[in-house]
Amino acid sequence: PGAGQDRVAVAFCALITLFTIFFGSRHIATREKHEGLVFAIAFESLIKLIALGGVGLYALYGVFDGPQQLELWLLQNQTALASLHTPLQEGPWRTLLLVFFASAIVMPHMYHMTFTENLNPRSLVSASWGLPLFLLLISLAVPLILWAGLKLGATTSPEYFTLGIGIAANSKSLALLAYIGGLSAASGLIIVTTLALSGMALNHLVLPLYQPPAEGNIYRWLKWTRRGLIVAIIALGYGFYLMLGAQQDLANLGIVAFVATLQFLPGVLSVLYWPTANRRGFIAGLLAGISVWAVSMLLPLIGNLQGFYIPWLNMIYVLDDTSWHMAAIASLAANVLLFTLISLFTNASPEEAGAAEACAVDNVRRPQRRALPAVWPVS
């Protein structure tokens, strides 16, 4: 079974690589809009909504025989409702809200779809209510799927109950619908993330280190270099999958990824609201935050460490559902502290100062002194 899973994973990665190249690097221009990609992502979102809605309706009417039977089952199984009334823990939940709010602008795929592929800035007004509505519709099916999985005794973990319900009910069509929905969601996420990362790597890693020959076709070189980066990024993702195996669940992987991208939040906010910040401070803060994140979250994940002792706090740190927020806050605090200190005690270059002024020109909270001409009325 393991060899079969690896072959499926390799085939999936190869297919995703071809789709990413097809949608994102067919043409020479690296800054063009990809309307086909936007349509594909919208279509996969619709498939995901249909899949979750279909499984949710089956859970309500196929497993519980309607809302009345569901209410009766909940009255007979109070433990299924008890978890919904568990008080929220202050540390993890507040940090989780911060992480999720920040992910809207710092996650590569979210940033790419929000800004890079946006044809009209006024579309953000529609997205401000359309995206929450979409998330609300998706979330309506989650409790139904959870309760149906508990009633059927699904053997999968709760995060895979969407598939587990079809397996427990011996319904191949339902399991296939859930599988297609999950595959569609994963494919869209990987394609957009890879496309965003390949563009960032090309502009900020490859080109500063290597300049293409002047006598060649630079646009062709850019296109094939970006394709090579797409292949490399997906290959690195597959290598990370092989390193982890099946030891980690989606929740842990998601939290680790979210906290990593959280380190970009101070830089994003300073671009708009703190013109004093500079490149040295941002890089120093980013390195500090990523270092703390790597030691406290990444190493326990890939090294399967049970925990390690922190002498100055006299405690044993274990990466789990109740302690991950400490690593997130510590990494962000180290980032902000070093970012602030370096920016305050070093001077920005003229180019940075000009860019900061340009970014803050529309900030209404920042006072500006401008000439106000007065003209006497002509009698």
Image (spheres, grey):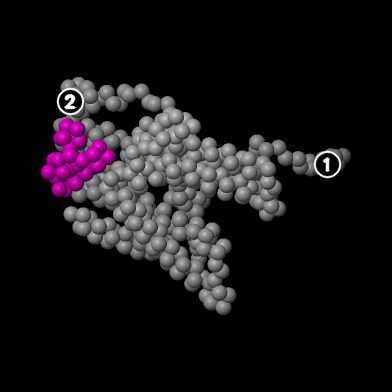
Q: Residue furthest toward the front?
A: 311
Q: Position of residue 331 (x, y in %)?
A: 49, 39
The quadrant in which the N terminus is found is bottom left
The label on residue 89 is none
Horizontal side, residue 373 vs residue 280: left or right: right
Residue at 22% from the left image edge and 48% from the top image edge: 177
Residue 375's tag is 1
Q: Which mark is residue 73?
A: 2
Distance in Å between CA atoms under marks 1 and 2: 78 Å
| Residue closer to the observer: 245 or 164 | 245
What is the tally of numbered marks visible in this picture? Answer: 2
Residue pictured at 39% horizontal, 45% vertical = 299
Seen in the picture, residue 117 relative to 93 is either above or below; the reply is below
Taking the spot 44% from the left edge, 45% from the top edge, the residue there is 294
Q: Nearer the viewer, residue 124 or 259?
A: 259
Magenta residues, start to end: 149-175
Residue 159 percent across, percent down from the top left: 27, 40
The answer to whether residue 50 shows anywhere in this view is: no
x then y, percent, for residue 341:
63, 40
Furthest residue in direction bottom, as rendered: 215
Numbered disc 2: secondary structure: helix
Q: Secondary structure at mark 1?
A: loop
Q: Are marks 1 and 2 in contact (CB under 8 Å)?
A: no
